[in-house]
Amino acid sequence: MDFKFLIYEKEGYVSRVTLNRPKVLNALNSEVFDEIGRAMDLAAADDGVHAVVITGGEKVFAAGADIAEMATADPVSVYKFGETAQGALNKVENLPKPVIAAINGYALGGGCELALACDIRIAGESAKIGLPEINLGIFPGAGGTQRLPRLVGAARAKELMFTGDMIDAARAEKIGLVNQVVPDGEVLSTAVKLAARMAQKGAVAMAMLKTAINQGLATDLASGLNIERQCFSLLFATEDQKEGMQAFMEKRKPEFKGR
């Protein structure tokens, strides 16, 4: 599959999606969001991909939505843009495989929202993260108003979105916005190593685990427990479950087949 604004690579069981609009700091327009969605479709359909890393390269993750595209937009075109953006990020969030954001430099606006849709966020020490849309007379429209409060709590999310302030990586880690802060030169390698570790786990169990967490968070506790029970039970029809438990009893490393 050809991409104009992304680089899609695969090494072992890990695919790497690199945003590639360096002249505009990886600004996210409708074409980029569409390509992100197509990249997730590609990863979902490939049984040889067990985990995904999304990066913007060594200097910037993504500095936000493409304001040049949005400045003269009308409500109808913005609604369509929102459908494209939210649709793409929903595919990131619901990909039945772990997705890790490797954040260097700025992750602002739509770039922050892309990171929020990932399962894990690794940030460089000099990363700057924020949702500054309020300073433009708008607010986050690609999932930020929904995903950020679920991640860091409503009060902290409101503070970030109401002020539009950027925060550094240390603050982001403290409030739970990122999982880990590492030296700038180690962001991508750390993310890839973590993805490779996750890729060695049982692919079916990983998919069911992600489903149980994501769907459970979107409902009440009783319903979430029911989702968990169903997903957990289904795993006992898989070869991987039998192999995993047999390997444990035989004190050896399991050889999962993803079925």
Image: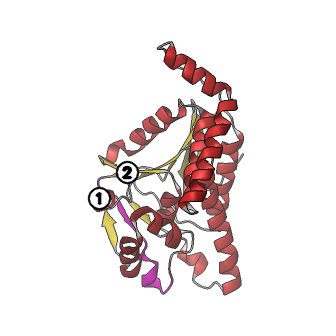
Indicate whether 70 appears above or below 185. Answer: below
Q: Quadrant of the C terminus?
A: top right
Q: Where is residue 18 in the image (x, y as percent from the top left)?
A: 54, 49
Q: Which residue is drawn at 37% across and 52% down?
A: 123
Three-letter residue code for mark 2: Asn
SS label for mark 2: loop
Mark 2 burial class by Cα count in 10 Å: few <14, some 14-19, many 20+:
some
Q: Residue at x 65, y 50 (%)?
A: 40
Q: How far apart are marks 2 and 1 (CA)?
A: 9 Å
Q: Residue at x 36, y 58 (%)?
A: 176
Q: Which residue is drawn at 52% across and 60% down?
A: 114
Query: Which residue range is magenta in the image?
Result: 125-139
Three-letter residue code for mark 1: Lys
Q: Mark 1 points at which residue?
A: 174
Q: Position of residue 22 (x, y in %)?
A: 49, 58
Q: Quadrant of the N terminus?
A: top right
Is residue 73 at all visible to an observer of this figure? yes
Q: How many marks?
A: 2
Contact between labelled residues 1 and 2, with CB atoms less than 8 Å apart = no
Q: Where is residue 112 in the image (x, y as percent from the top left)?
A: 46, 64
Q: Nearer the viewer, residue 66 or 89?
A: 89
SS label for mark 1: helix
2 or 1: tag closer to the N-terminus: 1
Q: Is 6 situated left or right of 106 in this image? A: right
Q: Nearer the viewer, residue 3 or 133?
A: 133
Indicate whether 12 appears above or below 216. Answer: above
Q: Give residue 243's quadrant in the image.
A: top right
Q: Where is residue 175 in the image (x, y as percent from the top left)?
A: 32, 62
Q: Tell whether position 132 is magenta.
A: yes
Q: Name the residue under label 2.
A: 179
Is residue 253 at all visible to an observer of this figure? no
